[in-house]
Image (cartoon, rainbow, N blue to C red):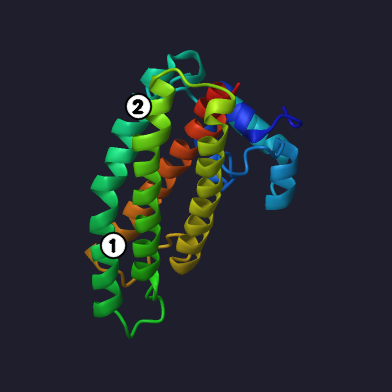
């Protein structure tokens, strides 16, 4: 397992994504790194991670999507991740604006977070529209291989940009560490952003490591 890419582990053992997220191991955009390489970069004991992976229980959400029909996977991406982001992110932007305004004098305030979320949201809306209006209809029509290579490559490049936004959001929020003096809005903001990050990593993983390889094969 140490020489297996993170993406392959996550694809064959869906419960592994929870372990990777607990240790901030990038299994979506950085999924081509082997477990040993990723652990070395993160300063983690790879053998301990292997034991944790073996002990991770399977839950009802751990669907082996590589074995399900392509259309079913696309519908799952649309309903859970596209609809979910449209529901969850705009209120978090408003919450970030409020926290920055009300707590401007506090040293822990995430200054610049709302602007970063606005930029991230604009890019995500554009990205999702490209998938919904261009790539996914092509896949529904049965396009494969060279026919979809270019739009898939564009989506993968944009996924890398999304990963960079997630890193910046983590930096601005001190890894979502809730300050002792945080109000209810501040607390909900950080918890909500942690949820958005987890969902987006799963979203990108399912596209980069399951849907796109199948479509371009």
- Up-down relation of residue 193 to residue 15 (above or below): below
- Residue 165 location in percent, x, y? 48, 58
- Residue 171 location in percent, x, y? 50, 65
Left or right? Give the position of 9 relative to 215: right
Depth check: 187 or 98 in front? 98
Depth check: 133 or 49 in front? 133
Q: Which residue is mark 1?
A: 93
Q: Taking the image as drawn, is residue 14 in sight?
A: no
**The residue tagged with tag 1: helix, strand or loop?**
helix
Left or right? Give the position of 54 relative to 200: right
Q: Residue at x 23, y 64 (%)?
A: 94
Q: Which mark is residue 76?
A: 2
For the N terminus, give its image quadrant: top right
For the C terminus, give its image quadrant: top right
Left or right? Give the position of 203 relative to 152: left
Farthest residue, direction bottom = 105
Q: Taking the image as drawn, is residue 8 in sight?
A: yes
- Up-down relation of residue 32 to residue 43 (above or below): above
- Residue 145 location in percent, x, y? 58, 23
Quadrant in the rendering for residue 51 = top right
Separation of disc 1 and disc 2 at Cα?
25 Å
Q: Residue at x 26, y 78 (%)?
A: 101
């Amino acid at each position: 397992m140490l020489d297996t890419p993170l993406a392959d582990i996550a694809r064959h053992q869906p419960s592994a994504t929870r372990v990777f997220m607990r240790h901030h191991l990038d299994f979506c955009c950085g999924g081509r790194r082997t477990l040993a390489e990723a652990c070395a970069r993160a300063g983690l004991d790879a053998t301990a991670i292997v034991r944790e992976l073996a002990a991770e229980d399977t839950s009802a959400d751990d669907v082996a999507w590589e074995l399900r029909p392509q259309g079913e996977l696309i519908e799952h991406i649309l309903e859970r991740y596209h609809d979910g982001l449209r529901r969850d992110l705009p209120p978090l932007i408003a919450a970030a604006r409020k926290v920055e305004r009300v707590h401007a004098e506090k040293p822990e305030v995430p200054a610049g977070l709302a602007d970063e979320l606005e930029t991230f949201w604009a890019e995500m809306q554009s990205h999702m529209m490209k998938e919904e209006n261009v790539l996914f209809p092509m896949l529904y029509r049965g396009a494969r291989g060279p026919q979809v290579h270019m739009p898939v490559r564009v989506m993968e490049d944009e996924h890398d940009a999304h990963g960079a936004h997630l890193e910046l959001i983590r930096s601005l929020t001190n890894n979502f560490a809730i300050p002792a003096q945080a109000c209810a809005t501040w607390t909900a903001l950080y918890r909500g952003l942690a949820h958005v990050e987890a969902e987006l990593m799963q979203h990108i993983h399912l596209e980069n490591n399951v849907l796109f390889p199948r479509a371009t094969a």
